[in-house]
Amino acid sequence: MSKICIVMLCLVGLAMAAPQSAPQARALQLDPVCLLSPIADPTQNCKNVSVRWYFDAVDGDCEDFVYSGCGGSENVFESEFACEVRCENVHDRMNSFESAESAESVEFLRGK
């Protein structure tokens, strides 16, 4: 019974010690460009329509969209690859770090 209480206290302590939620921590690690809206002025009506890519910070991946050809922010990429290089690699490193941190916490609780 006392081991269960200790484990529960450790879990509560770990939860309380986390200064930010995972999405907030991830957002702080992203290149600021990856947090921008891809469309700077949606009222512009340009005719050079093409498919472009932007990083969706909420979903954590690159998404395609129909780009009007003018305006926009730096969070508009000509290819999915360019978007991934700029934004997703940081996101993937954060996920790897969070996974490793979780594994270390479990090992600590198991007494390894």
Image: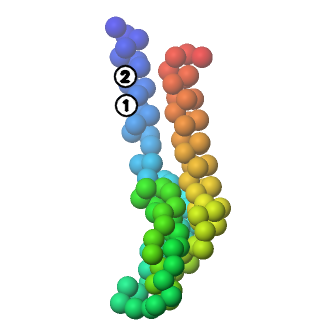
Residue 107 in sight: yes
Q: In terms of image quadrants, where is residue 5? A: top left
Q: In terms of image quadrants, where is residue 76? A: bottom right
Using the image, determine if residue 73 lies above or below residue 28. below
Using the image, determine if residue 21 lies above or below residue 64. above
- Look at 40% across and 37% down and name the residue there: 15
- Image coordinates of residue 90 in percent, x first then y, are 60, 56
- Image coordinates of residue 4 in percent, x first then y, are 37, 14
State the residue position of label 1: 12
Using the image, determine if residue 49 lies above or below residue 19. below
- Image coordinates of residue 75 in percent, x first then y, are 53, 73
Determine the CA span between mark 1 and mark 2. Answer: 6 Å
- Look at 35% across and 90% down and name the residue there: 43
Q: Quadrant of the C terminus?
A: top right
- Look at 59% across and 42% down and name the residue there: 96
Of the pair 44 and 59, the residue shown nearer to us: 44
Mark 1 element type? helix
Of the pair 82 and 60, the residue shown nearer to us: 82
State the residue position of label 2: 8
